[in-house]
Image (tube, rainbow, N blue to C red):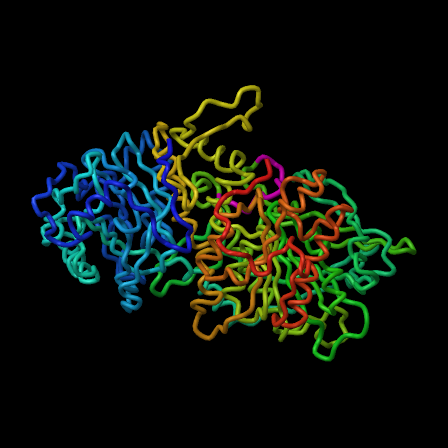
């Protein structure tokens, strides 16, 4: 059930106060120390344990140990359950206990000794105070509210999420005040917590935690009447990928991009083709290791969307370092000075579309395009290349890790005279599970037992590393036609990514200083949140829950639906700004905990973690670059609340273009109900004009080096540029 008291708009940053709380205000000034005045205290208090995660406020540095190799000087040390029974939990914790701090968007838990009035859990009564950066102490005293509150009636625990992304590698104080009331409206007592406040607490490192907690209490404003507090340190989320970028930037490519990768009659030829002479390009996608292939024909007409503006199509190959281990994840390193080390190198095929006309003196301005999950360089980039070429911009693309079919796939490029050149298709799918096949995204995600926690976190980071190498190649000079001159302008490199390409693109453009401007299209935030709320809820999250030992599926299967699509589960996590949710569903809390842990582990691949670096806090030596975020109302693959997470983390609402798809659908109900692919939907007569409008915004933006932002439909109502506040925090799905 839900307590019918809505949270206010997120921009207000405050929760409402209950009637019990307001009546207490009449008797005593809120949160004032010593304000008892004869008021009857409740016998309910906050639980406080020095050993049990579930019986004490969490997160807490009680569950860390000292580690001087980490930037935070701490490492997570959560106790393990019975690993013979809770096999999956033990696997999860083996990863978590290597991290140097807690989640930067934590699911906070506060257990009580009895029932409380859940509606008194507000931003006034529970909040966070930043104690400062773990090393420098900077940003001390910043206050952060709470949101997405769930009261678990069985365990007498309130769960809340921080109202905003917390700073990485920073210390925070969780403040719990006596504004929380029991069901009779009485102030809660301090219970055992006063011992912690006076330095008598214990933990894994003895009195060190109590000493740190006492020092942190100095940030609490005078007059606050606390009933509990917890000190915790957030993890370093962006350090590892930052150091990979720095290492690549400082390197020299082993060799130039090689365009002599075509073969004709067994002889090597340059994989460069005039668009006007092309008759067909046939993709032979490798599907099994036998090998077997699935044939399809690429749409040359897509390159002519804006007329004869694409002059040449080319394919080249370069080398990049591979950071994935044999379990398909990137091992963590000590965050103080550690640098992830490559295990090997691999070849990456790059596809290039050059505009018609004479090449500019410095080469063509270039846009790198990142494709969506399950896609390849043979779709998204093809759909937008014409709009870019019309503005004199070249388009380049690679296959993301795990995408494009097996490595033996080919492109059969045939001209009007019947001459066929065979080119490597650059497939990067790998047979991870050993079944002899190459799945559409196989290799993008970690192997079990790491799959449920890591997911595609490191498929993302490996793809980003490959893009760092691509930029390094462009900066060194890319000679497509072999005339000795660079065909791409190393000074004018932009990036656009759609869906998954927008997700990994967020971290790429935040860290790569050579990118001059970027457009992130339908990018969702945390992959756990994106899949939990969106179209991959069952295919990703449901199957993960079912595969755990023990299974976490807590609802009966959907009747009349074939497995695995019949999986159902309830995690009892409200959306932002919704009323406090009262959870009475067995097993929901365990699912929510698993999701929080997955997000915690995944923050190093979560573009929300990198959003502050785009504008608020750019890295040293990296200037603020212009960016546009394009999203659509009711997106079912990157749900609106996951896109707004990026905007909130980076203070980027003024850079958002919002496609009001409900208005479009109201005019034409034959349209798909999901607008996720609107940027590239050039194949349908009723979607092409909207795609072209969005592409024009992108192309104009890049042609002006980020100085010009046009509204795709001008003064029309269909594209808000920028988005009108408040931000859309509900799903907005078309029924």
Q: Main secondary structure of the magenta part?
A: loop
Give residue 716's position: percent from left, percent from top: 67, 57
- Is residue 171 rendered to the left or right of residue 290? left
Is 701 left or right of 132, judged from the image as shown? Answer: right
Q: Is residue 257 visible?
A: yes
Number of numbered tags placed on the structure image: 0
Q: Can you say whether 441 is above or below 248 in the image?
A: above
Q: Residue furthest top?
A: 560
531 up-or-down from 66: above or below? above
In the current view of this chain or complex, which residue is farthest to the left?
38
Q: Does 343 appear above or below 408?
A: below
- The magenta segment: 435-446
Give the camera-side residue of 442 and 239: 239
Is residue 326 visible to us here?
no
Is 206 on the left-hand or right-hand side of 20? Answer: left
Residue found at the very far bottom of the displayed protein = 361
Q: Give whichever of 346, 395 is nearer the camera.
A: 395
Quadrant placement of the N terminus: top left
Q: Which quadrant is home to the C terminus?
A: top right
Q: Is residue 504 left or right of residue 228?
A: right
Q: Which residue is pictured at 55% across the width and 47% down the height?
A: 638
- The answer to whether residue 642 is magenta is no
Of residue 17 and residue 112, the one placed in the foreground of this image is 17
For this rendering, which residue is in front, 128 or 498?
Answer: 128
Q: Position of residue 640 (x, y in %)?
A: 52, 48
As for residue 436 lying within the magenta part, the answer is yes
Q: Position of residue 544 (x, y in %)?
A: 47, 35
At 34% from the left and 33% from the top, the residue drawn is 582
At horizontal 19% and vertical 45% (from top left) the residue drawn is 24
Which residue is most to the right?
Answer: 417
């Amino acid at each position: 059930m839900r307590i019918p008291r809505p949270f206010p708009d997120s921009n207000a940053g405050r929760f409402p106060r209950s009637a019990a709380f307001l009546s207490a205000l009449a008797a005593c000034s809120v949160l004032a120390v010593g304000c008892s005045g004869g008021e009857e205290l409740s016998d309910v208090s906050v639980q406080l344990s020095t050993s049990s995660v579930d019986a004490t406020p969490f997160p807490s540095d009680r569950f860390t140990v000292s580690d001087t190799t980490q930037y935070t000087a701490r490492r997570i040390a959560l106790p393990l359950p019975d690993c013979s029974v809770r096999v999956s939990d033990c696997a999860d914790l083996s990863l978590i206990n290597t991290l140097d701090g807690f989640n930067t968007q934590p699911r906070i838990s506060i257990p009580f000794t009895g029932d409380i009035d859940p509606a008194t859990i507000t931003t006034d009564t529970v909040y966070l105070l930043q104690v400062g950066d773990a090393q420098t102490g900077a940003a001390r005293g910043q206050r952060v509210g709470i949101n997405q509150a769930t009261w678990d009636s069985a365990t007498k625990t309130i769960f809340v999420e921080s109202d905003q992304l917390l700073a990485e590698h920073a210390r925070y104080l969780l403040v719990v005040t006596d504004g929380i009331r029991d069901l009779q409206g009485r102030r809660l007592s301090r219970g055992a917590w006063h011992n912690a406040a006076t330095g008598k607490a214990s933990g894994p490192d003895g009195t060190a935690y109590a000493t740190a907690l006492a020092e942190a209490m100095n940030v609490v404003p005078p007059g606050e009447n606390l009933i509990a507090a917890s000190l915790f340190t957030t993890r370093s989320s962006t350090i590892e990928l930052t150091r990979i970028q720095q290492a690549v930037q400082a390197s020299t490519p082993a060799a130039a991009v090689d365009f002599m990768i075509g073969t004709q009659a067994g002889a090597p030829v340059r994989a460069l083709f005039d668009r006007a002479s092309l008759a067909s390009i046939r993709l032979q996608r490798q599907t099994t290791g036998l090998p077997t292939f699935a044939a399809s024909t690429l749409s040359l007409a897509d390159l002519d969307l804006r007329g004869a503006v694409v002059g040449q199509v080319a394919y080249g190959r370069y080398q990049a370092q591979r950071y994935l281990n044999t379990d398909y994840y990137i091992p963590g390193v000590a965050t103080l000075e550690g640098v992830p080390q490559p295990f090997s190198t691999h070849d990456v095929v790059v596809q290039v579309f050059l505009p018609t006309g004479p090449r500019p003196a410095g080469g063509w301005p270039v846009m790198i395009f990142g494709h969506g999950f399950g896609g390849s360089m043979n779709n998204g980039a093809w759909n937008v290349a014409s709009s870019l070429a019309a503005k004199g911009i070249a388009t380049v693309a690679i296959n993301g890790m795990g995408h494009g079919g097996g490595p033996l796939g080919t492109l059969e490029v045939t001209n009007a005279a019947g001459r066929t050149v065979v080119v490597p298709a650059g497939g990067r799918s790998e047979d991870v599970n050993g079944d002899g096949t190459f799945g559409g995204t196989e290799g993008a995600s970690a192997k079990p037992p790491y799959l449920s926690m890591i997911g595609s976190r490191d498929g993302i980071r490996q793809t980003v590393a490959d893009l760092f190498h691509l930029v390094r190649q462009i900066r060194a000079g890319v000679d497509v036609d072999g005339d000795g001159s660079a065909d791409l302008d190393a000074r004018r490199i932009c990036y656009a990514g759609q869906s998954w390409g927008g997700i990994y693109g967020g971290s790429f453009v935040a860290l790569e200083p050579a990118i001059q401007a970027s457009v992130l299209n339908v990018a969702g935030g945390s992959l756990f949140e994106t899949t939990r709320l969106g179209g991959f809820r069952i295919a990703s999250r449901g199957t993960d829950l079912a595969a755990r030992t023990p299974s976490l599926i807590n609802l009966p299967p959907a009747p009349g639906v074939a497995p695995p699509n019949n999986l159902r589960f309830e995690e009892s996590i409200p959306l932002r700004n919704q009323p406090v949710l009262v959870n009475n569903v067995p097993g929901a809390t365990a699912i929510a905990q698993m999701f929080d842990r997955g997000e915690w582990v995944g923050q190093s691949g979560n573009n929300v973690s990198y959003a502050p670096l785009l504008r608020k806090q750019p890295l040293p030596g990296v200037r603020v670059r212009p960016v546009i975020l394009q999203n659509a109302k009711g997106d079912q693959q990157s749900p609106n609340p996951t896109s707004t997470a990026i905007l909130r983390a980076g203070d980027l609402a003024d850079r958002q273009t919002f496609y009001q798809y409900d208005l479009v659908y109201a005019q034409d109900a034959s349209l798909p109900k999901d607008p996720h692919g609107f940027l590239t939907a050039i194949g349908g007569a009723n979607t092409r004009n909207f795609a072209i409008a969005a592409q024009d915004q992108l192309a104009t933006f890049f042609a002006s080096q980020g100085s010009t932002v046009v509204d795709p439909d001008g003064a029309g109502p269909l594209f808000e540029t920028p988005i009108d506040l408040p931000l859309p925090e509900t799903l907005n799905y078309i029924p």
